[in-house]
Image (tube, rainbow, N blue to C red):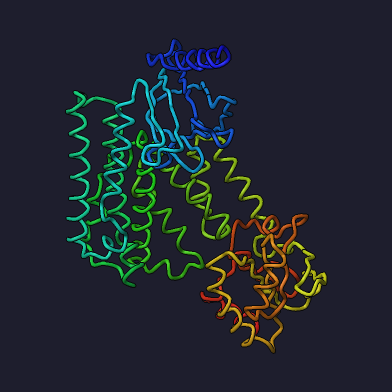
Amino acid sequence: MKKINLTLLALLSFLLSCSNFQKTKNAETVIICGEILNPTSGKLSIQDDSYFVSLHTIDTVINIDSSGSFKLNFKLNEASFYKINYENNNSSFFLMPGDSIFIQFNIGNAKKPFNVQGSNADKDEYIASYFGLCSSFDFSYEKYFTKSPEQFVKSIDSLYTIINTHLKDFQKSRNLNQQDLFLGMLEDHLRFEKFKYKAMYPFWYQSYLGKYPVLDKDYINNISDKKEINDDSNLKYQQFNEFLNFLIGYSTEKELKLNKKYDTLEVPYPVARYKVINELFTNDIIKSEQMFSFLNSQIREYGLAGISDMLNEFNHICVDTVKKNMIQQSYLRMEKIKKGEKAPNFSYLNSDGNTVSLADFKGKYVYIDIWATWCGACRKEIEILEELKRKYSNNDIVFVSISIDDDIDNWKKFVRQNNMTGIQLISNEKNPVPNMYMTSGAPYFILIDKEQKIINSRAPRPSSNIENLLNGLLN
């Protein structure tokens, strides 16, 4: 009995230490503590909630002690939204500098596993009710994005009127003034989310119906104004960043269609996107962020063609040395596998267990497919690739497929069941092909000439215009 009382006293002492929900003494320090009832593992994680914000202030795993208790202190410079995760359950909450909160998790309560108490408990309850409201809508991309432009705008505006009314009701019930920080951040989040959906509309309409909708010429420009999209304080909102990406994407597609000069360029998209970014943005911080986002993926996915002007301006206006270094490193790595460079050699096992090297095919063109059994896009290319192999069977070209699967037996089974011909290899951990050719995921295609020099380390897929390129080489 005495032992039980001591345990209860220890727990009570812990709860009391975490239950002082006043501001902490240090105006920038946040305290998060709590308990897990009947814990099934010894760790939980807390990170920025990427649905609301694009900030990266914390991403950490917290150890839970034997009683199920945990505690975390960290510095916070500005208010933001966070997410706690435990055993595939998560909850969002709002924090301001100096806050202290207590979180209790009950894995047995499926409807409300997390209970958050503290200086913003009512706001955290609102976030939960907001997600509940959103889940009650019959919202599906196919239902909304296949509507006519007029019906779509009316539907999406109506949807967000309901959500904003829900927020206004919360404001009145808690006597929050219009300048309340939480209220303002949620209003901004909702506005940018609505903007994002409107900018997404042309792309998803085309995806579902196979054609672009007939839009008013000012449709995209009327979503937001120049001043708002050039306000760099909005960059902290994830939905704002996603909105800008779709805004730039649509404007770039429009630029490519209206200006025939791009038809003469080998890789027109980066050139057109650069022009659009310069036309939309006057704020160098916003501009450099959009350039970074594009260059970071473009260099890795498609190589260096067409990016020189954007890269030069990015290096001139970007003040973030970490991001500049990331782009510089990607550029230098891609320089090693650009057109005309010696192709990195490889030696991998084939499906019969024999070693095959790139050097074995000197004197022939080599078309390499980097793929995986788990990759849906790869599977779609297999049938077309097999047709290419049959069509060019009497030409000086070798088709080499390199799997990045971990399970060799599963790979062999897949190759056999799908009657895959040509040279079938599997990459290894010692010298993985993704490291050689700077690929992430699959599929990727690489074309190498007879002297084992790179023609294109980001060659077209079989489903694209690869035949035009092959015919030009072979004829």
Which residue is nearer to you in this view: 136 or 191?
Answer: 136
Residue 171 on image: x %, y %: 20, 29
Residue 123 on image: x %, y %: 30, 29
Q: Is residue 24 above or below residue 345?
A: above
Q: Quick check: can you spot residue 235?
A: no
Name which quarter of the figure residue 304 lies in.
bottom right
| Left or right: residue 432 compared with residue 69 | right
Which residue is nearer to you in this view: 381 or 358?
Answer: 381
Name which quarter of the figure residue 431 lies in.
bottom right
Residue 209 on image: x %, y %: 31, 71
Q: Quadrant of the N terminus?
A: top right
Which residue is nearer to you in this view: 3 or 406?
Answer: 3
Q: Is residue 397 above or below residue 102?
A: below
Which residue is nearer to you in this view: 416 or 384?
Answer: 416
Residue drawn at x 54%, y 33% is: 39
Residue 315 on image: x %, y %: 53, 42
Q: Is residue 197 above or below residue 47?
A: below
> Farthest residue toward the bottom?
394
| Left or right: residue 274 compared with residue 218 | right
Q: Quick check: can you spot residue 415?
A: yes
Name which quarter of the figure residue 419 lies in.
bottom right
